[in-house]
Structures are given as structure tokens and as C-alpha cells.
Amino acid sequence: MKITGGDAILRSLEAEGVDVMFGIPGGAIMPTYDAMARGTTVRHVLARHEQGAGHMAEGYARASGRVGVAIATSGPGATNLVTPIADAWMDSTPLVCITGQVRSSLIGTDGFQECDITGITMPIVKHSWLVQDAREIPEVMRAAFHVARSGRCGPVLVDVPRDLQEALIDFSYPETVDLPGWKPPSKVHPLQIREAARAIANARKPVLYVGGGTLNGDACVELRQLAEGGTLPVITTLMGKSAFPEDHELHFGWPGMHGPKWSNLAMNTCDVLVAIGARFDDRVTGKLSAFAAGATVVHLDIDPAEISKLRDADIPVVGPLAKAVGELANEVARHRADGAPAPHAWLDQIRAWRDEFPLRYGSGGDWLKPQRVVETLQALTAGDDVIVTTGVGQHQMWAMQYVQSIRPRSFITSGGLGTMGYGIPAAIGAKAARPEATVVCIDGDGCFQMTAQELTTAVLDDLPIVVVLVNNGYLGMVTQWQDMFFDGRRSHVHLTAQVPDYAKLAEAYGGVGMVVENDADLEPALSEALSIGRTVVVDCRVDPAEHCFPMIPAGAAALDMIEYTETVEEAKAS
Amino acid sequence: MKHTLSVIVEDRPGALTRITTMFARRGFNIESLAVGPTERAGVSCITLRVDCTQHTLEQIEKQIHKLVNVLRVTELVSGEAVERELLVVRVSSPPERRAELVTTAEALGGRLLDVGPDAVVLELTGTPGEVDAFHELCRPYGVVDLVRTGRIGVPLASARRRAPRRLAAIN
């Protein structure tokens, strides 16, 4: 029996085991939405803006480890997906985006809502397809999912002209993929593993520098084996956060621009730096030439192009990380059993740094401190099945510093692209993936206003999330930079904490709004928000003068970080 | 340093664009580019000439290799490959100087393709150096139009076969 191209898209999603897709209908994708109306097992979550749909699909993917699916119409629907696609590209999030395209006969004629979305997205997708014959649909969908999740994960785009969604085809879903040019690494070279293990086991001051690839590569169990078997300190990047339990005695914080001093001291004075699914981002390294100078670099990655891209790897290991890290763990444990001593003195040194340079912030008089908000949230949710998402900016860095992530995939944030507005839709997507978990979005007031409309989706699609709004009335991180590096000239950063009235806005969207203005109200409000099972916005009015410390100024060496001091506080006050 | 890369791709829509976009995006400069079919149906060869450091070359190769339509990337190493370029040129040549021009051109391996009242069309296939020399020869007569294909090449049949350099996998 013949089915339409739109039905074929849905049968393909079903064959891939997709349970949720996120999208908005529009002209050029209508035949596929009509097919949805005729029936599919895939739940459709109706976003209010395609950017929201894309970030929801990302949140879903990061929380579940599966491919996220976003669907939109041509033209503006497709261009609204560009930000999430770029975000997924930078953070290696597996995403299949399906866009409608104008009829084949109109392509190239500047038809209504036509745009060359495959052209626009070319630099930010792993691959894309403009379907040219409806009979290709099953094969293209099969290939799209395969490419998105194999090798280094990332986004792909399938653009389907409207007439092909209407065309009738014989449907059979291919079991295999015919992509002769796509052969991601599947093996790990034993010699490289042996060499890496020898370097690590004999290091006096080793550090495991763990990035998001560890989560994407499902290598968290193996990472723990490696760290515990070798007694090796673990430092997780923002994207790697939650890959290793942060209450573990071998976890030593987060590196980079707003990482604690002890983490950066360890990273920068180690003798063997083991990068696992990490990519030497400038926010981690600071001045590259000064980063971990003199350390022997062992670099494990599924993507050969990351090896020696920024920092030459002394011992490269290319391959799937679960396999690579697992084999490395065995080899390192063998060295330990043979008498290679564990680096106890080094661990003591890092602990001493941690005691000497703890994260600090001021009391701030009457003001509620943003760090206190995150600390309180952490205290209230410790031990629970919680997923935290964030926007981008100061609140994100405080979330990194004060949220203790225990389970893999429980911290979801926009790292590479730094997409403000990521938090709310990503939280909704995470809730769709893990309805049993409590999903909290730690958001800033600037970020909130970029994607707040998705609260409607959270309410109406029964995907309740708790938004903890760190509201300082400013574009906080930009303000901090203006204060620190632009002689305090504040340029267009004041949003005001009162307009909009976030609590009323939450209620207008069908959720619950709360306002917290002091320490005393904080814990009761957060407790209630976490317990009522509805979409809640807790508007925490925090100290607008608070800066995020420590901080490595952009381009500076990591060890030239600016730390919190009372003097900094006083200078700010004057 | 200059390098020639031979990129074998599936002949799919956008395959060339994906490669050139990647070059532009990552700030790599292409000096010449030639595209054409190969012995296999549906498979094309893109020959790229780039001027870059060894480190950048390795990045380029690895980034190209990640493209889904790319089947193989090899470097045509100087001395181990034969490289050729085609030049077609329209040179002004009044009748009294025509014989001299054509004789010299043919002595260098060029061919006369067309003769007009005040110009001739010549072609030359040769190494990029020979093509440069031929261009210089034509210049004093007055070059009206000149087109070069950009170089193409294959590894020498007589070269001692080295283990193929694996570009994508470091291991």
C-alpha cells in the first residue's frame, strides 16, 4: 500500500523509536502535520517558537542520550531553528531537524516562505539533505539518525519540499545505511592505550580533564573505573559536569574562566593532562600558550580533528570513549597492581589548595546573594533525582560552582555557543525525556525573556518545570565585564528587576509565580516550588552588584585569575 | 608551504559546496581547485591546492574527512605524483608574427586550436611550471583571454609504493 511522504517521515521516526518530537506547523510542513492528525505513536510537543522547539529537542537529547527531533516549516520556521542547530553543533548534541520546504517547482524562485536552509546551515550541521524524490525519504531519515548519533554526535537537517510530503510512495524502512564516506572511528589502537596508560600511571601529578564527550560517549562508568583504579583527580568542564559524581573524593571542580582556583591550579601545574572528550576551549585554557605548560598531553576523542587542533597531543587516542577509557582503566589498574604508586602527595596538594582558596562571596547586607540561591536549591535537592538546566551568564557560572551534580546527564547547559534563553526550553525537553525527574532551570532575567513563551508549552503539555530566576535586573555578565574591563561604563545592560513582573507573567502563562527578596523567604519558597508539581517561576531578587569570581580575564593565563576579595567588594560599592 | 590534496567524493548535490564552505569557515585559503569525474560512476575528484603549514594541512585533511560525502583524502606529494594543468589562451597575432608564435608554441608542446584574422587560440597541457613558462612566452604578443584549469594529478605508477598515509585516524 502506498503512503504519503509525510506519513513516511512519521513511520521513519517510529521505526527509529522516537517517542517525542518538538515543533510548530506551518505551510510547507502541513502535509506531515496532516499525517500526524491521521495518527502516529510519536508524541508531538507544540512549542511557541521554533527556537524553543530546537532547544527542547536538545534538552531531550542531553537528558536521555537519544537523538532529539525538531520539526518546523520552511523559511522563518527553518531559520528560527538555526540557533539551536548551531548550539547542538558546538556542544555535539545529536539532533535531527526536519523542515518543510516550498514545492519543488518553486525552489529557487523566491517563493513565499522559501529559504535555502540547507545552504544557511551548511557550516553548522554534520550533514544535511534536501530531499529530491519522495522515494528517498526512508533512506534519508535512516541516514540522518545514523549520522546524528554515530561518531561525534551532532545536528543534521532534512529539508523536504511540500509536494514530496504529499507524494505517494511504497514505504519500507532500510535496515542498513548506505554512506560509504561516513566511517567514524570504531576501534581503539592498543599501542596508544598502552603508551597512555604508562604515562598516566607513572605521572606524579596527573589530572583527568573531562569534557562533554564523556557523556556523549557513554563513558561515565569507565571514567569512574579509571579514576578510582588509578587514584586520579577528576576535573570536569562545564559540558562534562555530571559525568563524574561531584560528591566523590576524586572530583576537584571545574576548570577555566570561572572555575575555582584549586581546579585551575591543578590543571595548570599537572605533569600529565588526560583530556577525555574535551576540546581545549578558550574558556577552559585561557591563554593557550600558558595552559598546562610543560604537561604531557594524553588526548582521548572520537573525533580525530580535535586531536592537536589547539594543543599538540603527545599521546593521541582516537576511538569511541567507552571503549578507550575502559581499556585505559584496565591498563592503569594493572600498572598500579604492579607497583606504580598512586599520586597521593598530589591529591593532598590539590586538597590543600581547595582548603586555602575556597569559593567565596560576600554577605552583602540586606541583599539576597545569587550564590545563596543556588546553594539553597542544592541543599534542598541533594540526593533527589534532579536535572538542572541553565541559561548563559553569571547565573550559569554560579550553577556550575554551587550545584553538585551526581548522576550523568543531570546538568544541561549551553557551553560552546553560549545561547541565552537555552534554559527554559531545554528544561521542558529534559522533562519530556525524564518525566520522573524534577527538572529545575536556573535562569537569569536576561535569558528568561528570550524564551519565556515556552512556559505555555510546559503548562499545556504537562511538562512542569521549576524556574529559579536569578533576577538582578541586569544583563549580569556583560555588566560584570563593563565594570571590570570597561572602566565601569555601563552600556545598555539595565533590564530592571521589576518589569516585567515575573511572578505575574508566570501566572499569565498558567503557572505559579513567587517572589523572594530575602534570605528568610528563600528556602520556604524553593521548597514549595519543588513540591507542588506545577510549572513555577521563583523570582529571586538578588544583589545587582554581585560579580562572579574567580575570573580569568579573556586571553589571560589561567593562573592570573582575579579572585574574590573584600577589596573588590569595596571597590564595587564605591 | 604549498600542498596538493586529492579529495574523492560522492557526486551528490552540495558535495563541493560543503568542502569549500568548510575551507571558508575555518579560514583556510584555496589557491586552485579542479573538479571532474573519475573512473567510477557517481564519484568525483576534487583537486585542491593550498598554501599552509603542515599543522594546518593536517587540520584541513581531518576536517574534510569528516564530511559525509567524502570517500578519501590524499596528499599528492611532490616527486611521488604526476601533476598537470591545462591552459587555453587567445593571443593577438597579426599575420606577419603568426608563424613565429605558432612555431615557438609548438616547440614547447603547445597546440594550435583556432586561427582568426588577428588572433590565435593555443592550448598547452603540462606541469604547472611548463604552463607558467608558456604563459610568459605568450605575454609579449598580447594575451587577450587566458584560462587555466588548476592542477590535477595522480600518484606516480613508478614510485615506490609507500604505506598509504592514514589521514583521518591518528592511531
Image (cartoon, helix red, strand yellow):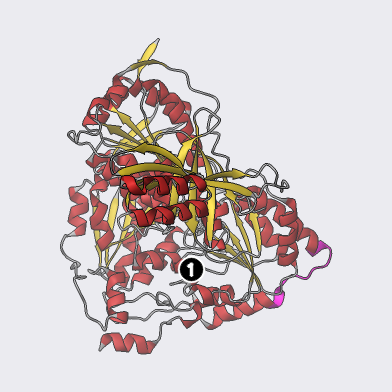
Magenta residue check for A341: yes
Residue A167 or residue A498, whichever sits in front = A167
**Magenta residues?**
A336-345
Q: Is residue B36 left or right of residue A469?
A: right
The image quadrant where one finds the C terminus of chain A is: bottom left
Q: Is residue A475 left or right of residue B135?
A: left
Q: In the image, what residue occupies the spot 57% across and 76% down?
A: A268
Whether residue A431 is visible here, answered yes or no, is no
- Image vertical order of residue A44 relative to residue B88, above or below: above
Whether residue B16 is visible here, answered yes or no, is yes
Residue furthest to the left: A499
Q: In the image, what residue occupies the spot 17% across and 55% down?
A: A504
Chain letter of mark 1 equals A
Q: In the image, what residue occupies the spot 51% across and 45% down?
A: B109
Q: Amino acid at mark 1?
A: Val
- Image vertical order of residue A487 relative to residue A467, above or below: below
**Label 1 CA crowd tier, 10 Å (few <14, some 14–19, many 20+):** many
Magenta residue check for A81: no
Q: Is residue A69 left or right of residue B38?
A: left
Which residue is label 1 attached to? Answer: A284
Residue A422 or residue B147, whichever sits in front = B147
Residue furthest to the right: A338
The image quadrant where one finds the N terminus of chain A is: top left
Whole-percent x and y of residue A47?
27, 41
Whole-percent x and y of residue B53?
53, 63
From the image, give the main secondary structure of the stretch colored magenta: loop
Q: Secondary structure at mark 1?
A: helix
- Image vertical order of residue A34 relative to residue A461, above or below: above
